[in-house]
Amino acid sequence: MKTLHRPATLSLVRCAIYTRKSTEEGLEQEFNSLDAQRESAQAYIASQQHEGWACLPDRYDDGGFTGGNTERPALQRLLTDINDGKVDVVVIYKIDRLSRSLLDFAKMMETFENHRVSLVSVTQQFNTATSMGRLVLNVLLSFAQFEREIIAERTRDKIAATRRKGKWAGGRPVLGYDVDPKGGRLLLIFDTYPSVDPRTGVKTLGFLHAPPPSRKT
């Protein structure tokens, strides 16, 4: 007579999905980038159900937040839940969704290791339990930080070039000016602007009025 051996019950592996998008553009869509990242992560977790993986219902979505720092509400909630022992695995679509800073990432990985939490990237295969896996992870993160710094440099150069040409580079207009509805420049909104006579030290004041169409900066 054969003895039937029942498989041992798998321990539940609680998986938290973290998603991030740097800008708010497109977040109003019914299916946006955050949804696409979460869907891919859910499919990966479903493929690991035989290992006891289960997706937590809580959503950790940061829309419109940079990966250059940790000042993100969903990320802070995730770290709090990790400290409280509610998470076993953090699943992300790509490593730069979690962080683009080597220093911040190193601190987060220390928190993960202290609470025995694993990190899984859907599109980048690595195992943080091995030294080679940690090396690959650091290389990927180095490129993510490099990409962020290059984008920041390009943005600063573009703003500086725009200002050198006397064009408006965006932001809040200074007092006494308004944004041209057509864009690209500022309009004067006073007849005269405060100035000081070098001989007398007397100031002249301006009076508010609707800017004429032909008025230029």
Image (cartoon, rainbow, N blue to C red):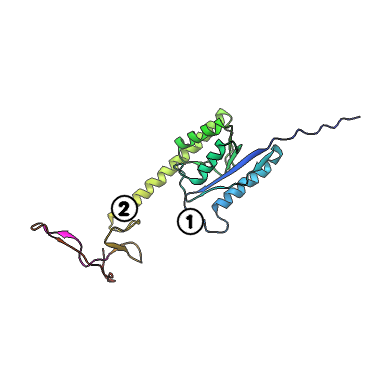
Q: Residue furthest left?
A: 199
- Total residue callouts: 2
- Marks 2 and 1: which is nearer the front? 1
Q: Position of residue 30 (x, y in %)?
A: 57, 59
Q: Position of residue 130 (x, y in %)?
A: 58, 29
Q: Position of residue 120 (x, y in %)?
A: 59, 38
Secondary structure found at label 2: helix
The Cα atoms of the two marked residues, 2 and 1, are separated by 25 Å
Q: Which mark is residue 161?
A: 2
Mark 1: few/some/many CA within 10 Å (<14, 14-19, 20+): few
Q: Is residue 72 left or right of residue 163?
A: right
Identify which residue is drawn at 50% across, 38% down.
140
Q: Considering depth in this image, is 147 or 16 the residue closer to the camera? A: 16
The quarter of the rendered structure image containing the C terminus is bottom left
Q: Considering depth in this image, is 67 or 134 the residue closer to the camera? A: 67
Q: Considering depth in this image, is 128 or 114 the residue closer to the camera? A: 114
Question: What stretch of residues is rendered in magenta?
Answer: 188-197
Q: Earlier in the sequence, mark 2 or mark 1?
A: 1
Mark 2: few/some/many CA within 10 Å (<14, 14-19, 20+): few
Give yes or no for residue 190 being in the magenta stretch: yes
Q: Check the image and report above or below for 76 versus 192.
A: above
Q: Quadrant of residue 183?
A: bottom left
Identify which residue is drawn at 58% across, 56% down.
31
Q: Amino acid at mark 2?
A: Ala
Q: Is residue 39 left or right of residue 10?
A: left
Identify which residue is drawn at 46% across, 37% down.
104
Give yes or no for residue 165 being in the magenta stretch: no
Secondary structure found at label 1: loop
Q: Amino acid at mark 1?
A: Glu
Q: Position of residue 65 (x, y in %)?
A: 47, 48
> According to the image, label 1 marks what residue?
25
